[in-house]
Image (cartoon, rainbow, N blue to C red):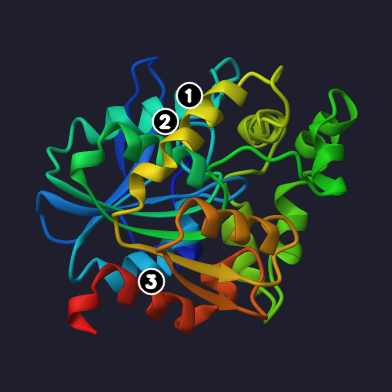
């Protein structure tokens, strides 16, 4: 098992937080941020693959002076433990987040989701619906689809795909370029994204996350995703903001249109020239939109 590395000074300059640890029911150490005022109201931010809580660093800095921020690294990702034999499935990831929330005594939870954090987050929210407040949806899905880019489909293959992802870092490393459009990540930002994934062992969950994408009924997480999808109409009365990068190579406008069908009352802002890493590529504009969605009463 790969355990949490120390945060080096160069990374702490970008990620100036003090992660906490939670032990999941299966015994893995889950790293998470708990920033801002101690309160029973919090913003829960959930990342996908191959990112980690680093993806939300600017949003945490912007939101935490006003509201508590809870930002976990899913098991196998970021600064969490990376066990070789963990159940890296959608259902387990939902349970892991619910287990963390169960220790925090929160009364009200607002949600920000990105990439596969969407399926995880809406799966969590459906189980604690009375506690859920506002939802901010960044290029993601929480419903079934058989659409997948060829380059990701290649990484799903047994053998070759695993070798590409774990030996060559052929998923996380290309993402730092492919997920941007308006600008490019700096060398330090790319280094930050890739910091947790520096070896075959540390990329176990990056590979497993790709393999777990449920495309057909025979896939392990297909039933769990179907359950998440069936719960989506229950959020139609919630304030939902879709903040969408229009140049996403993966979660493209097809997925945006699907969201509009599931949640027709959602407020939609499409950033036409922004790629998949919405908060980095959209910069201050994207951060401001998230703040406005979470705290509309403050303008």
Could you tell me which secondary element the residue under label 3 belongs to?
A: helix
- Left or right: residue 86 versus residue 50 is left
Q: What mark, if any, has residue 91 been given in the picture?
A: 1
Q: Disc 2 marks which residue?
A: 94
Mark with earlier residue (3, 1): 1
Q: Position of residue 182 (x, y in %)?
A: 68, 81
Mark with earlier residue (3, 2): 2
Per the model, the C-alpha gap separating discs 3 and 1 is 27 Å
Per the model, the C-alpha gap separating discs 3 and 2 is 23 Å
Work out whether residue 217 or residue 55 is closer to the camera in this orientation and state it: 217
Mark 2 residue crowding within 10 angstroms, few (<14) / some (14–19) / many (20+): many
Instruction: Quarter of the image for the N terminus: give it.
Output: top right
Q: Position of residue 172 (x, y in %)?
A: 70, 49
Q: Position of residue 162 (x, y in %)?
A: 80, 30
- Left or right: residue 127 versus residue 286 is left
- Viewer can see residue 286: yes
Q: What mark, if any, has residue 125 been given in the picture?
A: none
Q: Disc 3 marks which residue?
A: 290
The structure residue drawn at horizontal position 63% and vertical position 34%, both measured from the top left corner, is 209
Q: Is residue 287 above or below residue 8?
A: below
The structure residue drawn at horizontal position 81% and vertical position 37%, both measured from the top left corner, is 155
Instruction: Quarter of the image for the C terminus: give it.
Output: bottom left
Labels 2 and 1 touching (C-beta < 8 A): yes
Could you tell me which secondary element the residue under label 1 belongs to?
A: helix
Q: Position of residue 282 (x, y in %)?
A: 55, 78
- Left or right: residue 117 versus residue 135 is right
Work out whether residue 165 or residue 114 is closer to the camera in this orientation and state it: 114
- Left or right: residue 50 versus residue 268 is right
The structure residue drawn at horizontal position 65% and vertical position 80%, both measured from the top left corner, is 272
């Amino acid at each position: 098992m790969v355990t949490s590395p120390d945060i080096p000074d160069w990374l702490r300059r970008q990620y100036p937080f003090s992660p906490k640890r939670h032990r999941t029911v299966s015994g893995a150490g889950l790293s998470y941020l708990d920033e801002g005022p101690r309160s029973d109201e919090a913003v829960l931010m959930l990342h996908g693959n191959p990112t980690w809580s680093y993806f939300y660093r600017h949003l945490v800095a912007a939101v935490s002076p006003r509201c508590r921020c809870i930002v976990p690294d899913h098991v196998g990702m970021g600064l969490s433990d990376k066990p070789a034999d963990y159940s890296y499935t959608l259902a387990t990831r939902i349970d892991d987040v619910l287990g963390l929330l169960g220790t925090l005594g929160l009364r009200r939870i607002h949600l920000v989701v990105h990439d596969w954090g969407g399926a995880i987050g809406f799966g969590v929210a459906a189980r604690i619906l009375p506690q859920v407040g506002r939802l901010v949806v960044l290029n993601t899905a929480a419903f079934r689809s058989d659409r997948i880019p060829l380059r990701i489909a290649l990484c799903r293959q047994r053998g070759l795909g695993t070798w590409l992802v774990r030996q060559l870092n052929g998923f996380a490393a290309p993402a730092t370029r492919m997920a941007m459009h308006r600008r490019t990540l700096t060398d330090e930002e790319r280094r930050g994204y890739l910091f947790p994934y520096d070896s075959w062992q540390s990329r176990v969950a990056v590979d497993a996350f790709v393999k777990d994408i449920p495309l057909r009924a025979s896939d392990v997480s297909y039933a769990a995703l179907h359950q998440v999808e069936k719960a989506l109409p229950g959020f139609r009365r919630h304030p939902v903001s879709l903040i969408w990068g229009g140049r996403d190579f993966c979660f493209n406008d097809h997925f945006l249109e699907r969201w509009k069908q599931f949640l027709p009352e959602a407020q939609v802002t499409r950033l036409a020239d922004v790629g998949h890493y919405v908060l980095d590529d959209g910069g201050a504009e994207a951060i401001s939109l998230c703040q406005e969605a979470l705290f509309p009463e403050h303008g």
